[in-house]
Image (cartoon, rainbow, N blue to C red):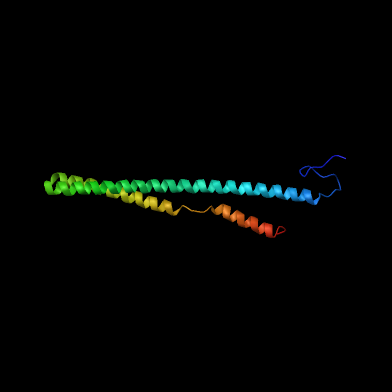
Amino acid sequence: MPSVSPQSPQPHGADPSVGELLSTVTSDVQELFRQEIELAKAEIRQEATKAGKAAGMYGGAGFAGYMVALFLSLAAMFGLANVMNAGWSALIIAGLWAGIGAVLYVMGRSRMREVSPKPEQTVETLKEDAQWARHPTK
């Protein structure tokens, strides 16, 4: 009589042994666990990308803030030195950088609020898996 592996079909009328059933369940659980880990990795990569973009916008806002301080300083210096011409032009440029910085900050803040620190889909499917494990017939 040929041997029957847990993955091959059973001969007609033969029930699988407890060992074969346990082996099948174990391999299924291992596969499910591997899939859950892959899902968690994909979610974390996706959230890290969002966080990276938001951090870049914060960096842009920081640079714009630096430019505001630089040009406001120059505007004050030229304004005192030359009551009209050079000071006012530096003040206009500083105002432009202030506007750019404000826009980048607002955009970065809104993107950062979209970032979720935990992998939501994985947590949900793990809850479903745990529910199924407690009540496999439902």
Residue at image location 56% in from the left, 49% down from the top: 40
Left or right: 98 with respect to 35? left
Count all numbered tags in the image, as a single digit: 0
Do we see residue 87 in this rendering?
A: yes
Left or right: 26 with respect to 12? left
Check the picture and name the quadrant holding the C terminus.
Answer: bottom right
Q: Nearer the viewer, residue 135 or 99?
A: 135
Check the picture and name the quadrant holding the N terminus.
Answer: top right
Residue positioned most to the top: 2
- Looking at the picture, how far across and down is residue 78, in whole percent? 15, 46
Q: Nearer the viewer, residue 92 or 77?
A: 77
- Looking at the picture, how far across and down is residue 20, in whole percent? 78, 48
Residue positioned most to the right: 1
Left or right: 84 with respect to 93? left
Residue at image location 39% in from the left, 53% down from the top: 109
Do we see residue 82 in this rendering?
A: no
- Looking at the picture, how far across and down is residue 127, in whole percent? 61, 57
Q: Nearer the viewer, residue 18 or 83?
A: 18
- Looking at the picture, how far across and down is residue 123, in whole percent? 57, 55
Residue positioned most to the front: 19
